[in-house]
Amino acid sequence: MSRWLTGALILSLLSLFSAPSFGAEPALWRVEQPQSGARLYLFGSLHFGAESFYPLPGRVLAAYQESDVLAVELDSDSLPPNLARQAVRRLGQYSENRNLSQHLDPELWFQLQHQSQALGLDPEQWLNIKPWLAALQLVSLQVSLSGYQQSLGLDSYFLGLARADQNTEIRELETLEQQLALFAGLSERQQNDFLARTLQDFDAGSAYLSALAQAWQVGDVEALEKAVLGAFNEEDYSQKLYHRVFRLRNKAMVEVLDGYLNQGEKVFLVVGVGHLLGEDGLVNLLGQQGYRVSRVD
């Protein structure tokens, strides 16, 4: 699995340790605006999950229940399927007279074919898509092979709660176009590097995801922060993606969250846990804005 993608979307490569024998105790932060009485909860999500993630701790569910708004990065379930397909086709597929094999080094195209055959896939299925989309599809395949499910991810869980109770307003911080543009905006060389690293790390994917899930379950923020930030090396595509996936997006998110707080709203934010960590993370940025930020134990 690509190290930067793990940091950005799946959020970490951690040393393996024993799985916890107790329920999940993930990290949760409270952000308060004393003047307006506004309250914002920051809950770090994984976009995949397992039955062992649930039930969530009472403190997490209580924070959600006292909030009037659920904010998420993207509510993919509400996207019209035809519009989603059109966006992916426009940004992630080649025109009829071009194909992926023409844009990859011969060795990299051979590696993709070899990995496809090992997985029982037809290598021809990659021909009409760009390197960044091929890499993302490989990552999605890693998740499914690992035994985790996107349907059990934390975003999906809370969106399900909000739809069921019908009293919680759902708000999206981003659009599908914005998220796809993170990858589509990479240069061809950077996309090829991304695909190469994804193939290189593919066999380690299951252990990778298991270790990340275990760290999330015990709420080990220090380990998560070290792993997420350490996953971005000095390679051009890695640094560019860190800037695009975290730094720029976090600043944009803070502007929206600042608006919620100034309006006196009570919001429960579910966002990929990597967005909360480090100097560029939401926890630190909101603290710099003068809000009172504390971890909820």
Image: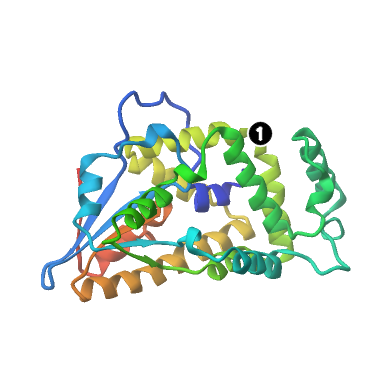
Crowd band around label 1 with a 10 angstrom C-alpha radius: few (<14), some (14–19), many (20+):
few
Where 124 sits versus 16, above or below? below
Percent position of residue 190, x then y: 69, 60
Where 53 sits versus 196, above or below? above
Q: Quadrant of the C terminus?
A: top left
Question: As drawn, is 126 to the left or to the right of 84?
Answer: right
Q: Tell how many labels.
A: 1
- Secondary structure under badge 1? helix
Q: Circle 1 is placed at which residue position?
A: 203
Q: Quadrant of the N terminus?
A: top right
Q: 90 or 3: which is nearer to us?
A: 90
Q: Residue at x 46, y 50 (%)?
A: 229
Q: Mark 1 is on which residue type?
A: Asp
Question: As drawn, is 250 to the left or to the right of 55?
Answer: right
Percent position of residue 290, x then y: 20, 69
Which color scheme did the rendering employ for the protein?
rainbow
Q: Residue at x 70, y 64 (%)?
A: 92
Where 64 sits versus 149, above or below? below
The quarter of the picture where residue 32 lies is: bottom left
Percent position of residue 108, x then y: 80, 48
Percent position of residue 78, x then y: 48, 63
The quarter of the picture where residue 191 lies is: bottom right
